[in-house]
Structure formats: C-alpha cells, structure tokens
Image (spheres, rainbow, N blue to C red):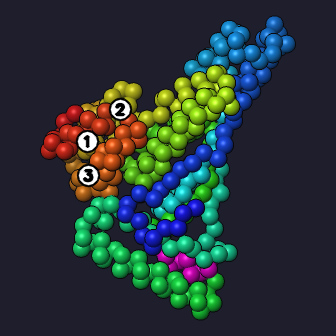
Amino acid sequence: MKNLAPYSAGYSDVDVSIVDYDKNIARHAWNCYRMTWRELQDVEYDVNDKRVHEAIRNIIAFKALPMPREQALMTFRIENVSRVCLAQITRQRKAAFNVESQMPQPVGHNVIIPLNIWQDENLRKEAIELCEASQNFYNKLVDMGIPYQDARYMLIHGQTTSFVYVVDINTFCGSFGMRCENNLSDEINLVYRLCLHRMLEQLEEDYESGDIDELTYLFYKDILAGCDCQGAKQRKGMNTDKVFGNSFMRFNDANEEVTAATVNCTCDFKKSAWYAELMRMYDNEEFELLFPGEKEMIERWKAGIFNET
C-alpha cells in the first residue's frame, strides 16, 4: 500500500487489483451440469468436446443450470476509497467484505476532496484547512490516550479506507445497473469500472499464459460483457432520481417521468464531482474506463452541447 498525502484530489488515488477468482469455473460448471443427464454423467470435462462447449454456452446464456454462475466468485482488493463509498458498496446484500480497521490502530490520514471542490482554488483551501483541523484534533486525542475507536468519530467522512470485496459474477454484473448510472453514482461508479477493467485485464493475462482454459476465459468474458448501467441495452436514460434526472444525457430520456425528473432536477450536473472526473478520464485518455457512447457524450460537453445525444 502506497503512502498517501493527507488529502487526495478527487478519486485519483482509488485503486483496484484482483486477489483471485475461480480459474476452474468451466470444469466446475460441467461437473455440475452433466449430472442432469444419465448419458453425460461419466463424460469427463474436455474443452474440445462439443457437448461441453454447448453446455457452457447455455450456462452463460441463462439457458441451462444457473448454479455455476452463482458460484463464480471474484475477489477484489479495493484501496483508498472514502468511507462514503464504503457505506454505499457494503449495501450489497450478496457479497462479503473485510475492511481495514480503525479500532486497534491509528488511521493513515488521507481524505478525498471531491474534484469539483479541488478545482476551485478558494474551496480547495477551505477544504484542506477543514481536513487538517480534523486530523490534528484526532492526533491530539490519540496523544492524550483517547482510544482509537473513540477518536475516529472526529474524522471527516471522506477519510479513506481499503477492503476486499468477494462477489459472485451474477451479483457483480447486476450491480452495474445503478452503480454505473452517471446520474446516480460517482466514486462507486469508478470503483466498479476499475473492478471490471482489472478483471478483463487479468483474464487476458491468464488466458495468454495458459493459467485458464478457453471455456473459463469465455465464461467470464462473455458474462462480464453485459456490465453497464440501467437502460444501456435499450439505449435509454432511465434515472428518475430528482438530483440530476437524466442530465448527463448519455442516452435520450426513456419516458415522460425521466424527462420531468430532468427538467425539475435539484442540482446542476456540470457542478458535480462525477462530471469533473469524467472530464479528467477523457483528458487523461483513460478511454478503457468509459462505456460505449460516453466518449462522444463528453465530446458534446466540451462543445457546449448538454441537452441532446
């Protein structure tokens, strides 16, 4: 884990890596599937057997035995996210987490200052002063012998932490509907994009090195290909939350309810941290983190076009 400054400029220090995943999921899927049919029960797993290929393809497509998809676990190491993001991601009902503790040890001071605040010189100065006041008071309490678990109450919610996230591929893909909806999610939006990107990178590396076979590679890659926000398949903006509505306008409004939420939204999306982060991704040419159509969406913003796709 790298040493961080007392504060971070937006989500620039957020990082994700792969701890492990089931590298024999296709073999496991076949060994479960073949018990359905008496004539297949003694057929061993073979990537060159057309029957095995067909079974794995059907499992991927939800046409046969959903159990292996539910058992395909991935473990991510997620570092330097705010406690705000932690509170969001741990709402996940079907997953397991182990989080860096703030009770038996002092924290490593690092607070995420949202990029929209960081980019304003006056606001950045005030934010840093606030962070420093909180951190100095925490240090004072600890030096006085106040237990760590009590002193931590005086820290800002943007204080960062790290954790491992264990999740099956079905639950993971389903999370993208809301977690990667630009009009709803920001830091956690980036976390899921990084998880997906790192997993796809790991699959390529392991397949090329021979650590996984073709069917395991296809199992993960084909299922993960469906990861995107709600409405992406229909190419329609479906967010009805009234903070931004469908202001980001990756897609046109799905219906009148979405349009009403957008027209009457309570905040200007151009002043949001996620707007600034997407702009930074584009400027840094991190196009691998963008979903289809988002590069063009950002280019429209840069051209001053905000209300059409």
Write the residue at 26% across / 35% down: 296
Give the vertical position of 172 relative to 43 (above or below).
below
Q: Which residue carries the number 2 mark? A: 292
Q: Nearer the viewer, mark 3 or mark 1?
A: 1
Three-letter code for the amino acid on which mark 2 is drawn: Pro
Q: Are marks 1 and 2 in contact (CB under 8 Å)?
A: no
* 222 to the left or right of 39: left
Write the residue at 29% across / 47% down: 283
Residue 298, disc: 1
Q: Quadrant of the N terminus?
A: bottom right
Three-letter code for the amino acid on which mark 3 is drawn: Phe
Which mark sits nearer the N-terminus, 3 or 1?
A: 3
Q: Are marks 3 and 1 in contact (CB under 8 Å)?
A: no
Three-letter code for the amino acid on which mark 1 is drawn: Ile
Q: Tell me where the magenta segment starts and ends, as one range.
A: 148-157
Q: CA distance from mark 2 to mark 3?
A: 20 Å
Give the vertical position of 100 relative to 308 (above or below).
below
Q: Quadrant of the C terminus?
A: top left
Crowdedness of circle 3 by 10 Å Cα count: few (<14), some, many (20+)? many
